[in-house]
Amino acid sequence: MEAKIIEKPGFTIVGMKCDTTMKEKDEIIPKVVDDFHMERMGEVNDRINAPHAYGVFIDPPNWDPETEPFTWITAVEVESVDNVPEGMISKTIPAHTYATVYYDPKIMKMNPYIDLHRWINEQGYTQIEGFGFEVHTSYEGDDTPYTLHLPVQKG
């Protein structure tokens, strides 16, 4: 696994969201992602940095992954949020220090989330709770490769 620490400036996304539990995520999230990528992405104005797209997770405070839902947003980066299409939302992701790892499910046999969490701890960092995101450069359904970003701080 080739993880690294990067600094990333803030950015704004527009896309579709769903709330789901860890138990139901593998059924619910792919439906929303497919709908956005196949049907709705073209409605987003002022898109920048194509072909990159995002999968953002937002956990509530003191989140219990066994019982509580979290929010997933499938989106693209935009220059402005003047015309957010109906049924979509905008979200600004703040500038942060991130631990990152690239993952391609077609050729890699790892769990990028678990492995990156472990690597973060081994490097003397602490994950900042509450959110993280995947960056996709192409959409290939369940086989979509991505770079996972988890916000961290030293210590």
Image (tube, rainbow, N blue to C red):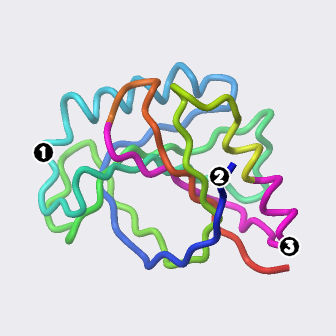
Q: Which residues are magenta?
A: 117-138
The residue under label 2 is which amino acid type? Asp
The residue under label 1 is which amino acid type? Glu
Q: Residue at x 46, y 38 (%)?
A: 145
Residue topped by disc 2: 59
Residue topped by disc 3: 124
Q: CA distance from mark 2 to mark 3?
A: 23 Å
Please tell me which of labels 2 and 3 falls first in the chain.
2
Q: Residue at x 39, y 46 (%)?
A: 136
Of 43 and 76, nearer the camera is 76
Q: CA distance from mark 3 to mark 1?
A: 43 Å
Is disc 3 placed on a helix, strand or loop?
loop
Please tell me which of labels 3 and 1 falls first in the chain.
1
Circle 1 residues within 10 Å: few <14, some 14–19, many ≥20 = some
Please tell me which of labels 1 and 2 falls first in the chain.
1
Indicate left or right for 88 with 20 as reference: left
Question: In which quarter of the view is residue 84 placed?
Answer: bottom left
Residue topped by disc 1: 43
Q: Residue at x 20, y 41 (%)?
A: 41
Image quadrant where one finds the C terminus? bottom right
Of 83 and 52, nearer the camera is 52
